[in-house]
Image (spheres, rainbow, N blue to C red):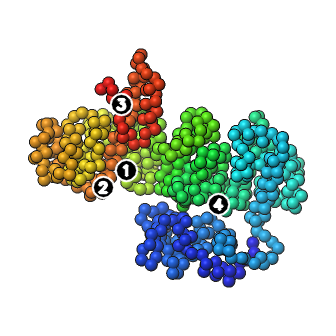
Amino acid sequence: MARIPDEIIQQIRDRVDLVDLVGRFVTLKKAGRSYTGLCPFHGEKTPSFNVNPDRQAFYCFGCQEGGNAITFLMKIENLSFPEAARALAAERGIEIPETDSGERGLAERLYEANETAQTAYRAALAAPGNPALAYLAKRGIDAATIERFGIGFAPDRWDFVAQRLHERGIAAELAERAGILAARPSGGHYDRLRGRVTFPIRDTRGRILGFGGRALAPDQEPKYLNTPESPVYRKREGFYGFPMALDPIRRGERAVVVEGYFDLIALHRAGVEAVLATCGTALSAEHARDLRRRTKQVVLLFDGDEAGQRAITRALEVLLPEGLRVRAAVLPAGEDPDSFLRGKGAEALRGLVDRAAPALDRVIERALALGCATPAQKADAVAAVAPLLALIPAPVERAGFEQQLALSVGVEARHVEAAVRAVQRGQDPRDAVPIAARRREPEERYIEQLIRCLLEHPALAARVPSAEIETLIAAGPLRELLETLVAAGGQGPRSDLEALCERLEPPARSRLRSLAATDDAPSEATAARTVDDTLAVLRKRSLRTQRQALKNRLREPDADADALLGEIQRLREEPAGTKPSRLATRHG
Ligand SMILES: [Zn+2]
């Protein structure tokens, strides 16, 4: 690529506003004369990333990255210096004179080869009567969608694209490096994607890196074939759908990740545009870093089969260390996003994405499904999830999931914590869970913790909906105590312990005295969080119990199956589960 003159570089740096540029990737807050935000180049919870508008310079006190607008764009979009400078120049309307050195970079020539192939594929698809059009129509893909996604067709001939490239003066050797053509052992080249529907894989700037191809003939193997890696196409980094997803991801503060081309198109047709597809590879650490620079939240939408479930776990292994919040939408078994859209409609598919539960909930549910009745099964369930929890960098978040896992499995939280620490030290997490019977219900510990928070900070009682207590906690002294505390509202039990005791039955009274005697005093903020977390965990547990009760009632001879199934589905979809099920409580 031709060298860019210094005065042009200076013009770019003068006319690009760094605060504006950085602000597209990082939420900035004004602090004195400069701006601060969370560094996009390393994971952090408190902002140490600074932008100085006077000097048009940025600097991170955490990882020491620093520079100007051009270097910022280079780092964040993974561009070379000339690429970043040209991108900014184009945006600001600065013309770069082409000093004709004749020799263009290899990357430029590969992009050109790919664009030429793209033109040929699209023309081939537009040709009437070709089998690809009928195939796409059968999958519900119309002309506008074909246009929008640049879908094309490589005819089932050995030399269709080779000829078009040759006519445009593109050497077969270059097309081979781009991956469009493959070399024959006997000499010469053939079209790699022949007989396939083609999808161009573009980078954030819209340049074509490579292609994906879907077989048309039922017996053609493999079903999906991509062009191989090239000097411009690295599969550990590429996403399908990038240029169209950039703005929606920024605006919606989340990115939906799917596995295939048709899945991504299905989501677009359902109105979800913040979506990226991995191209025939699992999510890599590079993908995860790229996502983290653009968003805080990722929603995984994988197939509803066993492989899809395993893919969620694999994705968590790379996404969690980046500090990303990961949700997982679960499709019914045997469905993919495309088939689900065609069967259930756009609104249903959108709802599935919007209501996606934390992915770790799914993993915990799956671990429980293998059974957790015996102590050994409990140890197995904890050991199955602990390695993922060990990857969560934020202690508060990790503790929340540890608590949830402990409560779901029915072990004490400290055993889960020990299992997570064991993983971090490279030891067997199974050893951390004692096989002996435990002393108390874990649920009790959480309710005690909740009550202690209310004793210390009576105002927090307002966070506990009194009508809900009955559904969340089994009858007994602790429920009585909590109901009384919440009913007392903001009145200070600390100073008024005796008055409170008056209102309680003896067992609850002695529980209150022992709880009030413990002297851990969390700050109000910590206590508030504990109250909320504990309620969330109790709600989840209660939902599960309600579902089980409904399932048991399904087996009764006079069961109204439709009403029960509807109710079970409603409970499944209710994320926080604030409303108790009327059907579940009718008998008791
Ligand atoms: Zn940094």
Circles 2 and 1: CB atoms closer than 8 Å = no
**Which numbered disc, 4 or 3, marks the residue closer to the eye?**
3
Looking at the rendered structure, the kind of residue marked 2 is Thr
77 up-or-down from 118: above or below: below
**With 153 as the anchor, is 243 left or right in this view?**
left
- Residue 204 shows which numbered tag? 4
Picture residue at 70% right of the left edge, 51% below the top:
149
- As helix, strand or loop, the secondary structure at mark 1 comes to helix
Q: Quadrant of the C terminus?
A: top left
- As helix, strand or loop, the secondary structure at mark 3 comes to helix
Looking at the rendered structure, the kind of residue marked 3 is Arg
Which residue reaches farthest bottom?
A: 7
Q: Earlier in the sequence, mark 1 or mark 4?
A: 4
**With 283 as the anchor, is 402 left or right in this view?**
left
Instruction: Tell me residue 321's x, y (percent).
Output: 49, 54
From this viewpoint, is residue 343 visible?
yes
Looking at the rendered structure, the kind of residue marked 1 is Ala
Marks 1/4: CA–CA distance: 36 Å
The residue at which mark 3 appears reads as: 582
**Which numbered disc, 1 or 4, marks the residue closer to the eye?**
4
The residue at which mark 1 appears reads as: 399
**Which numbered disc, 2 or 3, marks the residue closer to the eye?**
3
